[in-house]
Each structure stands twice: as C-alpha cells, then as structure tokens.
Amino acid sequence: MSEESPFRKDKKQDLENQLIYRKSLLKGQTKKIAQDNIKLKENLRQVVRNFLKKEAE
C-alpha cells in the first residue's frame, strides 16, 4: 500500500499542474506564464512541506 501512495500523489500533482496550466491559458496568458505558474505552485508546496516539518520537530 505504501508503494502506491507516491504514485497517487504524483498523479494528483500532475492533474493539479494541468489544471493550473489550462486555467492560465484560458485567462489569455502565454504558455511561458502558465509554466511559471506551475513552478510557483510547486515551490509553494515545498515551502509549506518544509514549514510543517519544522513545526513537527
């Protein structure tokens, strides 16, 4: 079961990234901006993860 978990998480993140990308394009933004939006969201997730780890210690 624990082996499946990362796959599902990655698939969920992939779907979220596709959603961000499509929303960005619908707003009339360029593909470059859409890709930057995905990077920003991933960076935000990492910051939150690191913060939660520090709080747990």
Image (cartoon, rainbow, N blue to C red):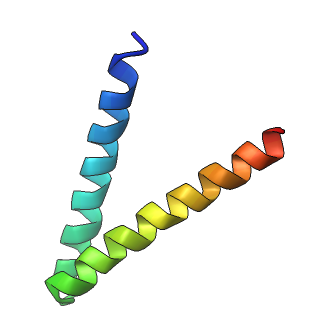
Q: Does residue 38 sit above or below 54 in this rendering?
A: below
Q: Quadrant of residue 42?
A: bottom left
Total labels drawn: 0
Q: Of 42 and 28, which appears nearest the observer?
A: 42
Q: Position of residue 7 (x, y in %)?
A: 30, 29
Q: Position of residue 20 (x, y in %)?
A: 29, 67
Quarter of the picture holding the N terminus: top left
**Residue 53 left/right relative to 46:** right
Q: Quadrant of residue 2?
A: top left
**Residue 28 left/right relative to 42:** left
- Taking the spot 21% from the left edge, 89% from the top edge, the residue there is 29
Q: Position of residue 46 (x, y in %)?
A: 54, 56
Q: Does residue 7 sit above or below 35 in this rendering?
A: above
**Residue 53 left/right relative to 16:** right
Q: Position of residue 14 (x, y in %)?
A: 26, 49
Q: Of 57 and 52, which appears nearest the observer?
A: 57
- Taking the spot 81% from the left edge, 46% from the top edge, the residue there is 55
Q: Does residue 40 sit above or below 12 in this rendering?
A: below
- Taking the spot 25% from the left edge, 78% from the top edge, the residue there is 34
Quarter of the picture holding the C terminus: top right
- Taking the spot 25% from the left edge, 49% from the top edge, the residue there is 15
